[in-house]
Amino acid sequence: MYSQKVMDHFMNPRNVGEMPDADGIGTEGNPVCGDVMKLYIKVDGDRIVDAKFQTFGCGAAIAVSSMITEMVKGKTLDEALKISKETVADALDGLPPQKMHCSNLGADALKKAIEDYLSKVKK
């Protein structure tokens, strides 16, 4: 049912934890399944240099969170904003149709974290 990559990121999630000095924080929840994802980013110039997450949810939600943090490191903000639910699912070698909403959580939390950062910088 799940790809090896999904299982790997679920069993060995990368970048788990809080980031007290985060430059941007995005929180996204899905009332359908009860998953909640909090994504932290650290930005240097125009580039995301670090990312961490805290996710309460199913294995797919945890795998998506882990993959998103790996995907965004080193990317510019514009590049990171182009990460979609499809690119996350593809990076995990696919998700079952009933779990695709988890990739929405990741992409939406990332966009909110970037928006949070940008709102602080513009002040």
Image (cartoon, rainbow, N blue to C red):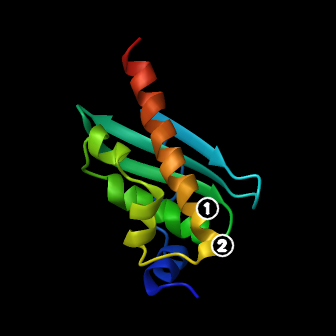
Q: Judge whether residue 6 can be spotted in this image.
A: yes
Q: Which mark is residue 109?
A: none
Residue 37: x %, y % from top left: 61, 52
The image shows residue 10, relative to residue 25, as above or below, that is below
Q: Is residue 104 left or right of residue 94?
A: right
Residue type at mark 1 is His
Q: CA distance from mark 1 to mark 2?
A: 7 Å
Of 23 and 67, nearer the camera is 67
Q: Which residue is mark 2?
A: 98
Q: Which residue is mark 1?
A: 101
Residue 23: x %, y % from top left: 42, 32
Q: Which quarter of the picture shows residue 48?
A: top left
Q: Is residue 29 left or right of residue 42?
A: right
Mark 2 packing: few (<14 Cα in 10 Å), some, or many (20+)? few
Residue 94: x %, y % from top left: 46, 76
The image shows residue 7, relative to residue 62, as above or below, that is below
Determine the residue located farthest toward the top in the rendered image: 123
Identify the residue at image location x=62%, y=46%: 28
In the picture, the quarter occupied by the N terminus is bottom right
